[in-house]
Amino acid sequence: MTVSSPQTITDDLRRWIADQLDAGCQADDVVAAMCASGWQAGVARDALAATLKRRQAEPAGVAAVAELPARPAAKALPEPTLDGAPTLLRAQGHALRLQMAMHQPRVIVFAGLLSDEECDRLVALARPRLARSETVDNSTGGSEVNAARTSSGMFFERGETALIDRIEQRIAALLNWPLDHGEGLQVLHYLPGAEYRQHHDYFDPQHPGSATILRRGGQRVATLVMYLNTPQGGGATTFPDVGLEVAPVKGSAVFFSYDRPDASTLTLHGGAPVLSGEKWVATKWLREGVFT
């Protein structure tokens, strides 16, 4: 679910509600889940009523759902090799540990993906280049400052330094995804009170600006968030649709993939406010094609 401001009932939201009803969820539970994700109660009830009305207007409630935009076919995704349920993994000679794996949504937590020295070096390289973080402008495909994202950040070019290249090679090997199918690393810095409100990382094809973005490598298909320090309090990566919180621990990382630009992937997520200390993360977004 994408919570917009002002909150509007979109096709994306109606499709998500229809999916929950088809899966056997009760109407009250659907509304409760929406409210827990930040939707206003009145908007949530109106969205449910609109979806039910559309379904009831058609025979067996089937054609109504078909009015919604068709989902693209599922595609191949980045994915680590986990045959035999290993707890220890190696990528480009680097040892790391598998801490948690969830299938729906596909969320995996790795420990020790980065060494302490690599984390500290990334912070040192990024610090002088920080600027107020921006988000995608859905109308143009450019970027803009947004109150939903209160961090500062910067981007490294792919392979910009030997350190960046080594980390990117490690990620490509770990996730079995071509190195040139990834965007450059983004480093973000959060001070106390800073957060990134709930959002999806894919580009909504219905937004006017998405066509421009998708020309540079196609759709995003996965995200890897690497924690460069351990805040004193707060700063978890949250997945409200499934009630999951991943603690930010230095050197660890959370990976999640999404096979289509749709709320049914359950990859709505956010960065909870930092309560004390500071938080540094490096994010790697993976595309379906070569990112230029």
Image (cartoon, rainbow, N blue to C red):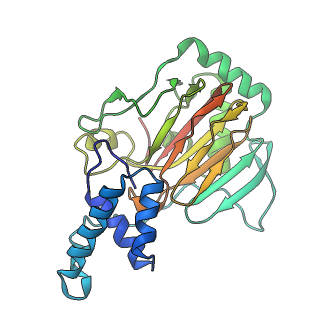
Q: Residue at horizontal 30%, vertical 34%?
A: 137
Q: Residue at horizontal 47%, vertical 40%?
A: 197
Q: Is residue 208 left or right of residue 186?
A: left
Which of the two residues, 291 or 121, is positioned nearer the viewer here?
Answer: 121
The number of numbered badges drawn on the structure is 0
Q: Residue furthest left?
A: 57
Q: Quadrant of the N terminus?
A: bottom left
x, y percent for residue 165: 63, 30
Which of the two residues, 273 or 96, is positioned nearer the viewer here?
Answer: 273
> 270 above or below 128?
below
Which of the two residues, 185 or 94, is positioned nearer the viewer here?
Answer: 185
- Kindly tell me whether residue 255 is visible in this rendering: yes
Q: Is residue 86 left or right of residue 273?
A: right
- Kindly tell me whether residue 14 is visible in this rendering: no
x, y percent for residue 246: 66, 48
x, y percent for residue 275: 64, 31
Q: Residue furthest front?
A: 42
Q: Residue furthest top?
A: 128
Q: Quadrant of the C terminus?
A: top left
Q: Residue at horizontal 26%, vertical 60%?
A: 11
Q: Residue furthest bottom?
A: 60
x, y percent for residue 239: 55, 52
> 277 above or below 211?
above
> 92 above or below 258?
above
